[in-house]
Image (cartoon, rainbow, N blue to C red):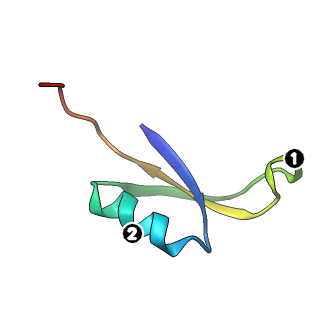
Amino acid sequence: MQICTTRDNIACQRVVRANGGVRVEQLERPERHGGKRAVRYQITLGPRS
């Protein structure tokens, strides 16, 4: 699963990393999506129990 958050949302980034998120890239969001710098994380999901 991939999750994006803005670079200034430190709390969200901490939660994502605490749950196994690994930073994939930094990007500029298009103006229609706020135009802010963002960070994309990858989280590998395990099997459901």
From the viewer's side, name the closer residue of 15 and 24.
15
From the viewer's side, name the closer residue of 45 and 26.
45
Who comes first in sequence, dot 1 or dot 2? 2
Kindly identify which numbered label has been placed on residue 43.
Answer: none
Residue at 11% across, 25% down = 49
What percent of the width, then of the height, locates residue 14? 39, 69
Q: Is residue 20 left or right of residue 2?
A: left
Quadrant of image for the N terminus: top left
Amino acid, disc 2: Arg
What percent of the width, then of the height, locates residue 32? 87, 47
Q: Is residue 30 left or right of residue 15?
A: right
Q: Secondary structure at mark 2?
A: helix
Q: To which residue does mark 2 refer?
A: 14
What percent of the width, then of the height, locates residue 39? 57, 60
Tell me, yes or no, whether the two marked residues, 1 and 2, touch with CB atoms within 8 Å: no
Residue at 28% across, 63% down = 18
Residue at 82% across, 50% down = 30
Kindly identify which numbered label has been placed on residue 32.
Answer: 1
